[in-house]
Amino acid sequence: MDVLLVDHPLARARLTTMRDARTDSAAFRAALQELTMMLIYEATREAPVAVERVHTPVARTDGYRLANPPLLVPVLRAGLGMADQAHKLIPDAQMGFVGLARNEETLQPTPYLAALPNDLSGRPVLVLDPMLATGGSLAYTINLLVERGATDVTAVVALAAPEGLRRLEESGLPVRVVTASVDERLNDSGFIVPGLGDAGDRQYGEP
Ligand code: PRP
């Protein structure tokens, strides 16, 4: 499984703001949005382009656009904080939504929403979620996409635990991961260490 680590200094600075327990909700959301811009930028670096001629005020030249804009899929709640920024960078993307809440005791994802196109064959998909912890939420989401025919899935996460990456790798699901950090480990409560706490709560408060 491909893992692209975006460890650009500006990405590291935003992630540091998100990690800092003193960062308030508004500053956390702003840092996540800025980090998302960098992650999406790198995630789409190899995306195929279509060439079309364009007239500048001076001459004709080749212009470019994404040949096959991806479906964006934020995983609610925390992934919502990445959705607008990703959409700004890829304005012609369609967006689907998956809602999951991780049971704090069993660590299993409890689904409450899946609003996705029925046929995803031939369409790249970018799944947006700040955290890849046990990998249960992403594995569940990617399965929903694969059931609909997706074969080209990129998970865009702010940070990942090695345990979650291993689980995705062992699942054999067709996914590549773009992340700003691979942290040390998960603790007994399923939190990423050092991590940043709970990305949903830090953006929106406890439900
Ligand atoms: C968090 C996070 C991921 C998931 C990661 O969401 O945003 O979706 O947990 O954990 P996993 O890799 O072990 O599945 P949570 O369930 O807390 O919901 P929220 O986004 O509504 O806060």
Image: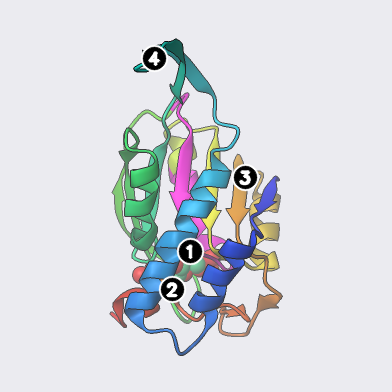
Task: Say whether disc 1 or disc 2 marks the residue closer to the N-terminus.
Answer: 1
Q: Callout 3: 10 Å neighbours few (<14), some, many (20+)?
A: many
Q: State whether residue 201 appears in this view.
A: no
**Beta carbon at label 3 within 8 Å of ligand 1:** no
Nearer to the camera, 37 or 175: 37
| Residue on which disc 1 sits | 130
Q: Secondary structure at mark 4?
A: loop
The residue identified by callout 4 is 58
Q: Please state which amino acid type lies under the numbered disc 4.
A: Val
Per the image, label 2 sits on a secondary structure element best described as helix
Q: Which residue is mark 2?
A: 199
Are circles 4 and 3 on residues that touch, CB within 8 Å? Answer: no
Give residue 94's quadrant in the image.
Answer: top left
Distance Cα–Cα, label 3 vs label 2: 21 Å
> Residue at the location (35% across, 62% down)?
81
| 201 part of magenta stretch | no
Is residue 89 depicted above or below 133 in this figure? above
Q: Residue shown at 60%/39% (left/top)?
A: 174
What is the quadrant of the C terminus in the image? bottom left
Q: What distance separates the C-alpha of mark 4 from that of mark 3?
A: 42 Å
Q: Position of residue 116 (x, y in %)?
A: 32, 41
C-alpha span from label 2 to label 4: 48 Å
Q: Which residue is mark 3?
A: 176
Q: Residue lying farthest bottom?
A: 22
Q: Quadrant of ligand 1?
A: bottom left
Image position of 42 (left or right of 83): right
Quadrant in the picture for the N terminus: top right
Judging depth in this view, the residue of 146 and 2 nearest the camera is 2
**Around disc 2, counting alpha carbons within 10 Å, would you say few (fewer than 14), some (14 to 19), or many (20 or more)?**
many
Q: Is the residue indicated by label 2 positioned so its CB lies within 8 Å of ligand 1?
A: yes
Residues at badges 1 and 3 in contact (C-beta under 8 Å)?
Answer: no
Q: Nearer the viewer, residue 111 or 80?
A: 80
